Amino acid sequence: MSTPAALEARGVSARLGLAEVLHGIDLSLASGRWTSIVGPNGAGKSTLLKVLAGLLAHGGEVRLHGQALSTLPGRARARRLSWLGQGVAGEGSADDLTVYDVAMLGRLPHQRWLAAPSAADRAAVERALRSTQAWDWRERPLGQLSGGERQRVLLARALAVEAELLLMDEPLANLDPPHQADWMRTVQALVAEGKTVVSVLHELNAALAADAMVVMAAGRVTHHGGCGDAATHRALEAVFDHRVAFHHVAGQWLALPH
């Protein structure tokens, strides 16, 4: 029995300014799995992820569990789909907020207008901050944190939504290797709970730990398959000009310079 689709793109195209950057993409992402999206710079990875999140105008259609994403009210969409964007760790507008308050922003889709956080909200925020090892500095202002620390707080904000689907664009940016490993364990735990994760990654070895991989080049999907499949490795070698090769080491696939 095939796994039902969490997200589907049907004939999706998108422009940035006058340039068309996505060209008629058809894609079905399985529910309850971690899918990584990879490809060279300029392939359209981040643009595709923004389209799937409903953050960018586009042609074609995106469907969330069979329902057109455009028909979902904003709050309902925000409860079901959590977003961690690229580069937000450097924004200064929230610098005066404490770590705890930033993570609590993830609970806004669950709260009534101007209502105080509930016990469920506070519990979700604590779980999220503990899972990213940010709980101990929950009272610190965001502006006092390093880039890696900020990234962990913003990840906690995304986790605090407790959405069924998480979309993350370059979530490993600014994270040192131990916290990259922590992020991977967090994702694997989410999938074990039945949640769906889609992540754009430059780190090929992290991307190879996913359940499935979407390979992109020049605004098109060139391959979609299992991370351990020989066909996936061939597609990756092709889009990276055969400058990487794949080796099975200690039970996992690694991308190494060719």
Image (cartoon, rainbow, N blue to C red):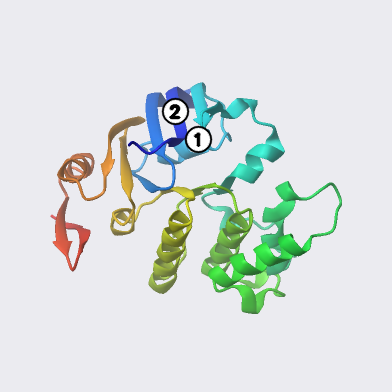
Q: Is residue 221 above or below residue 94?
A: above
- How many residues crowd mark 1 within 10 Å: few (<14), some (14–19), many (20+)? many
The answer to whether residue 30 is seen in the rendering is yes
Which quarter of the figure is the N terminus placed in? Answer: top left
Which element carries disc 2, helix, strand or loop? Answer: strand
Mark before the other along the chain sequence, 1 or 2: 2
Q: Nearer the viewer, residue 32 or 205?
A: 32
Q: Position of residue 157 (x, y in %)?
A: 62, 58
Tell me the kind of residue under disc 2.
Ala
Residue in the picture at 54% in, 49% down? 85
Tell me the kind of residue under disc 1.
Leu
Q: Position of residue 242 (x, y in %)?
A: 15, 45
Q: Quadrant of residue 135?
A: bottom right
Residue in the picture at 44% in, 54% down? 191
Q: To which residue does mark 1 refer?
A: 52
- Real-space CA distance between mark 1 and mark 2, rounded to the nearest whole angstrom: 7 Å
Which quarter of the figure is the C terminus placed in? Answer: bottom left
Which element carries disc 1, helix, strand or loop? Answer: helix
Tell me whether circle 1 and circle 2 mark residues in contact (CB < 8 Å). yes
Q: Position of residue 215 (x, y in %)?
A: 30, 39
The answer to whether residue 39 is seen in the rendering is no
Is residue 256 shown left or right of residue 32? left
Q: Is residue 233 above or below residue 4?
A: below
